[in-house]
Amino acid sequence: MTDALPTLKEADALRADIYQLLATLLRQAPDAELLNWLAELAIEQDGSRLAECWQALAAAAADAEHGRLQSAHFRHLVGVIQGEVVPYASWYRNGELMEAALVALRQDLRVLGFERSEHTRDPEDHLAALCEVMAMLIESASQEQAYFFSQHLAPWAASCFADLGQVDTAFYAALGQLGGAFMESEQARLSIDAGQTPVRIVEL
């Protein structure tokens, strides 16, 4: 008889859910069901920036139309050549796509056992993909969370979300503000969890 897998703590389960939500909203416009769910969120007002950002996203979702968000998503995050915001680590860290940040990320993903899906055309350093990896690391209670965040999200994700927070579509501006606040929260949490010294991924 084998031992049951440890239950994911409520706080960690919530963190994983937020990463997954950010990834979903960065990859594509929300459908009507997700938009309604966001609009009906009950936010505990504790005076924190994170709570204010959740409230702003819920309010923006209540006023948004799915069809308009589809075109806004394309304009802000995709574009014919590139969107107004380019959500790739190599763009923010190296000034070009497919650069050193992507190479380093691929090395760490290989060590962690992650493989790129055959169904996606985006390079692995897309912000949505990195959020998905963080969600999976949390769900598996991986000790590499702090290292992965410090190496592949902390140097640039907040800046990317800040840029998104400046766009002229209320929903995506609210998403950018929420993402930035969450990155700040994660930076504080993971720095404490790692004892200020992130664990390095070592390939055996």
Image: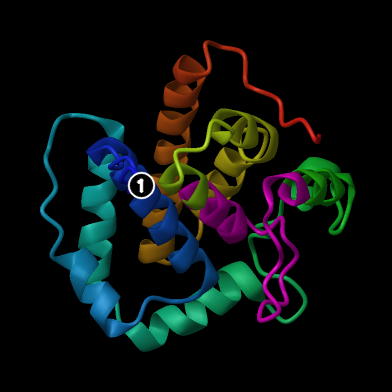
- The image shows residue 49, relative to residue 94, as above or below, that is above
Task: Please state the extent of the stretch shown in magenta in the rendering.
Answer: 109-135
User: Residue at image x 64%, y 60%?
Assistant: 85
Rendering coords of residue 19 (x, y %): 43, 51
- The image shows residue 32, relative to residue 190, as above or below, that is below
Q: Nearer the viewer, residue 168 or 45?
A: 45
Image quarter (top left, top right, bottom left or bottom right) of the C terminus: top right
Q: Confirm whether the magenta stretch covers residue 131.
A: yes
Rendering coords of residue 146 (x, y %): 56, 29
> Badge 1 is on which residue?
2
State left or right for residue 168 relative to residue 60: right
**Does residue 168 appear anywhere in the picture?**
no
Image quarter for residue 116? Answer: bottom right
User: Residue at image x 77%, y 30%?
Assistant: 202
**Does residue 128 appear anywhere in the picture?**
yes
Rendering coords of residue 136 (x, y %): 49, 52
State left or right for residue 77 relative to residue 202: left
- The image shows residue 63, relative to residue 90, as above or below, that is below
SS of the residue under disc 1:
loop
Rendering coords of residue 5 (x, y %): 34, 45
How many numbered tags mark residues here?
1
State left or right for residue 152 relative to residue 184: right
Outermost residue on the bottom side: it is 67
Q: Amino acid at mark 1?
A: Thr
Q: Confirm whether the magenta stretch covers residue 182.
A: no
Q: Nearer the viewer, residue 23 or 40?
A: 23
Q: Nearer the viewer, residue 124 or 35?
A: 124
- The image shows residue 35, relative to residue 143, as above or below, that is below
